[in-house]
């Protein structure tokens, strides 16, 4: 939801904290710390690993990131 609310494209990593003592508040205890729109893209990073598991090659995801960045 945070990715979409802030208009991020393609991929992002959202870092957050959770406070279970505030689970009944409107935000359910979640606090967004940062949105990283360029998470690790080395061959050892999790994004390429996730893409590969979905049948998307490293070259394809980099191409998509570049195209989205230009639009």
Image: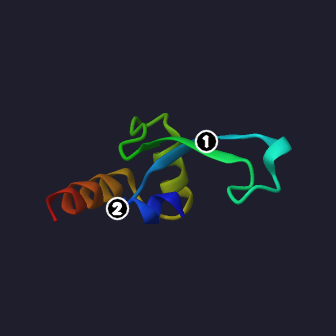
Tag shown at residue 42? none
Q: Which residue is mark 2?
A: 9
* Mark 2 element type: loop
Q: Is residue 61 above or below residue 13?
A: below
Q: Is residue 1 above or below residue 14?
A: below
Q: Which quadrant would residue 57 be assigned to in this image?
A: bottom left
x then y, percent, for residue 29: 74, 48
Q: Is residue 1 above or below residue 16?
A: below
x then y, percent, for residue 23: 81, 52
Q: In the current view of this chain or complex, which residue is farthest to the front?
A: 25
Left or right for 62, reference 46: left
Mark 1–mark 2 contact, CB under 8 Å?
no
Q: Looking at the image, which residue is at 76% across and 55% down? A: 25
> What quarter of the picture does the N terminus occupy?
bottom right
x then y, percent, for residue 8: 37, 59
Choose the circle earlier in sequence order: 1 or 2. 2
Q: Looking at the image, which residue is at 20% across and 62% down? A: 67
Please state which of residues 66 and 52 is positioned toward the viewer in this rendering. Answer: 66
Please state which of residues 52 and 13 is positioned toward the viewer in this rendering. Answer: 13
Bin the neighbour count of mark 1 within 10 Å (Cα to Cα): few under 14, some 14-19, many 20 and up. Answer: few
Distance Cα–Cα, label 1 vs label 2: 19 Å
> What quarter of the picture does the C terminus occupy?
bottom left
x then y, percent, for residue 6: 39, 59
Q: Which residue is mark 1?
A: 16
């Amino acid at each position: 939801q945070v990715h979409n609310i802030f208009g991020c494209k393609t991929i992002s990593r959202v870092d957050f904290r959770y406070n279970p003592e505030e689970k009944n508040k409107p935000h359910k205890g979640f606090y967004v710390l940062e949105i990283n729109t360029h998470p690790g893209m080395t061959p050892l990073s999790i994004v390429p690993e996730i893409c590969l598991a979905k049948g998307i090659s490293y070259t394809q995801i980099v191409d998509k990131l570049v195209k989205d960045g230009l639009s």
